[in-house]
Image (cartoon, helix red, strand yellow):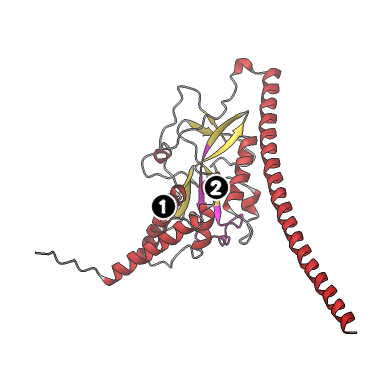
Amino acid sequence: PQRRPERVDRATSSQLWRRRAARESMNWLFGGGRSDSPSRTGRADRLQDALAVIDDACARAGLSRTYPNRGLLADQVGALAEGFPGLQPRHALYPGWQHPLICLDGTVPIAHGGAGYNIPVNLWIFPSFPHPLVGSIPPSPLALVVTPTPGMVLKPGHPSVDAAGRCSLSAIARWAPRGSTLSAVLAEACAAFSAVPPVYALPQGHVVQALPSGQAVAHGGVAQAQLAEHQPPQAPAQPPPQHSGRADTRELTRELAEGRREFIALRLRERAAELARESAAREAELARERAVLQERARHVIDVEAQCFAEA
């Protein structure tokens, strides 16, 4: 005998349908209108799953729905798939919040001393995105935190990173809801980290004691045990004492100069490509205007010729 289908509660069916529709819309956004982009589709699924967990947590706590502008959030997170593939969205607890928040967890690439490295970071996105969080200093919907792995430590006295790993960037301090993007924030962070890496590798034999499972790092909200999943970047270690002196200063200056030159060259190439696109667009616009003027001139000539013929 045929098995009778199980009855599904209408509220549960409606909730599943809404989640499926939201996930398909995010897949469309991340894939640029296509459904065959694996990296962006996977990122859309993770973001949708994280938002679903946050919604459930808010509903249980009797709080209102967070992240009202989810279309813009999905668009900006999806735009990071090309330049920052090491960052993936997830949900995590941030100190002082009653419910989880969206966190982009992973690494960002930098270039220093002629070599490439990956810096572990967490980019926290507050529920007010893209509008600044009320009462935050500076007024911004973001918080970027460097999260060193157990084999690394933060560089003391870094110009852009404090002792807790929190980053101070102009793109965060001057955040504008209509003009700022997550890509611009991460691009500035990569530039600052390329000039002066925020972490360095510990000497061999030194071990950092891991925190108990579930204990969060200040301003980061991620346990050290969770940070072990990242591959520690081989950041340039401090020079040994026996090689200190003028020669080491010249070598460090040379490495910093090479890193700046590579970064400046990359920026110049990007700017040249942008100018080329603007020039092509301007030429196309001028061609259209020229065609319109020529059509009008032919029309005027035809009208004048008709008037002379009638006269």
Please say if 18 is above or below 138. Answer: below
Residue 202 visible in the picture? yes
Q: Secondary structure at mark 2?
A: strand
* Distance from the alpha carbon under mark 1 to that under mark 2: 20 Å
The residue labelled by disc 1 is 46
Q: Nearer the viewer, residue 203 or 189?
A: 189
Which residue sits at x=41%, y=66%?
63
Which residue sits at x=41%, y=55%?
50
Q: Give percent across and percent down for residue 115.
A: 59, 29
Which quadrant does the N terminus fall into? Answer: bottom left
For residue 144, which numbered disc appears in the image?
2
Q: Give percent across and percent down for residue 121.
A: 51, 42
Amino acid at circle 2:
Leu
**Magenta stretch: residue 123 in it?**
yes
**Quadrant in the picture for residue 2:** bottom left
- 293 displayed left or right of 190: right
Label whose residue precedes the other's in the sequence (1 or 2): 1
